[in-house]
Image (cartoon, rainbow, N blue to C red):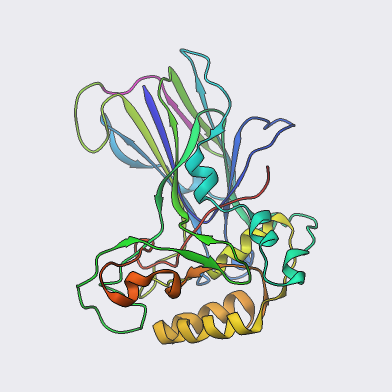
Amino acid sequence: MRIRIHFRGLVLFWFPEDGADAGKLVAELISDPRRLQRPGRPHEHRAEIQEITAKGGVRNIPPNGVDEGRIDITVRGPKLVPPVTRSASFDQYVPRLSEVLAAGTTDAIRQLPRGVRDMNYVRNTVVVDRGQIRVKDVVIWDAGGFPLNGGGPDGILPSLPTVLKFLGSEKEGHMANECVIDIPDVAHLSLRGPRLKEDYDEADHRPNRPGGNDAVELLVTNYEAPRGRPTPWGMDFQWLFATAGYPVTALPTDEFAAFQTFATRFERNLFDEDWLELMDRGQDGRPFPYIAEERNPFVVNRSMKPLNDIDSRPVCVPAIGGP
């Protein structure tokens, strides 16, 4: 049977080279560390796993089987499947934290020291022992529904991939919002975690909906609750840096002021909420992605339009935390 494992949302990927998880993919699902003191904060992310098969349809794995724990996804035969590898698309479209900092626009950002990791941000860990990970989709924006100038819907511009830029860094380009691990030939698949035990020995060979025949798909998501409208920035990306052990520093004043002008024109209330929740209304922080209008000329000439995440959520980009 074929296995496909999808990752969406705020995820920090690691590829350990030694230790018990050497050769595996370690995906840390990140959330607000203050959630334990006050559940339901605006940017509290929650992991969900769906199983999609032709035989059983779509099934949600119970929340108490995935929340606040580690889940191991392992496969067996019939052929020897090599350890996890990365496709060229993954290396191109998933930003690496160290590269974002190396392209920093100030000495303070470029020289930001890495300290002790803060595991309070890690809500769940999903570990996969085989397969190749690639980028399925990059960020798009629905400009017809949510014009970046803050105006009302006009229905003229379609959703298309958009260029993102990191505030405080020269790093920019199209960036992933969904990654997939493909394993084409598997005899057995297992999921293990706290109060979680799932095994798959075969898939259904009949064409059916919603899953493909002879396939098991797992959809791993880590989103916050939808808000009134999507936001063309992802300030919670800073939590990936915090998880990896990077402290805050002063972000460049000029660029932050320009970003603030853009963000408040789009939706002042959403910006004010994010600025308070994620930066305490200051300018000390870590680089985060946002849609760069000047890098997307189609937004101006209205011949085309950029891209965004689904369901009225902020731009949500995963990252690579290590080698």
Residue 57 percent coordinates (x, y): 27, 37
Q: Is residue 200 magenta?
A: yes
Residue in the picture at 52% in, 67% down: 165
Q: Residue furthest top?
A: 78
Please check the rendered image and state whether residue 290 is part of the magenta-colored stretch, yes or no. Answer: no
Q: Residue at x 37, y 35 (%)?
A: 217
Q: Nearer the viewer, residue 291 or 47?
A: 291
Q: Is residue 310 left or right of residue 16?
A: left
Indicate the position of residue 275 as horizontal and vertical percent values.
57, 80
The magenta stretch is: 197-204
From the top left corner, tell me how far across and down residue 143 is, in percent.
30, 71
Residue 133 seen: yes
Task: Tell me if I can see residue 65 in this picture.
Answer: no
Quadrant into which the C terminus falls: top right
On screen, residue 187 versus residue 305, left or right, reads right
Residue nearer the viewer, 82 or 229: 82
Above or below — where is 195 with respect to 64? above
> Relative to 256, does residue 55 appear above or below in the rendering?
above
Q: Does residue 64 appear to the left or right of 119 in the view shown?
A: left
Task: State the residue in front, 35 or 133.
Answer: 133
Q: Is residue 239 above or below residue 2?
A: below
Which image quarter is the N terminus in? top left
How many numbered tags mark residues here?
Answer: 0
Q: Residue 190, how many percent across, how many down?
A: 49, 27
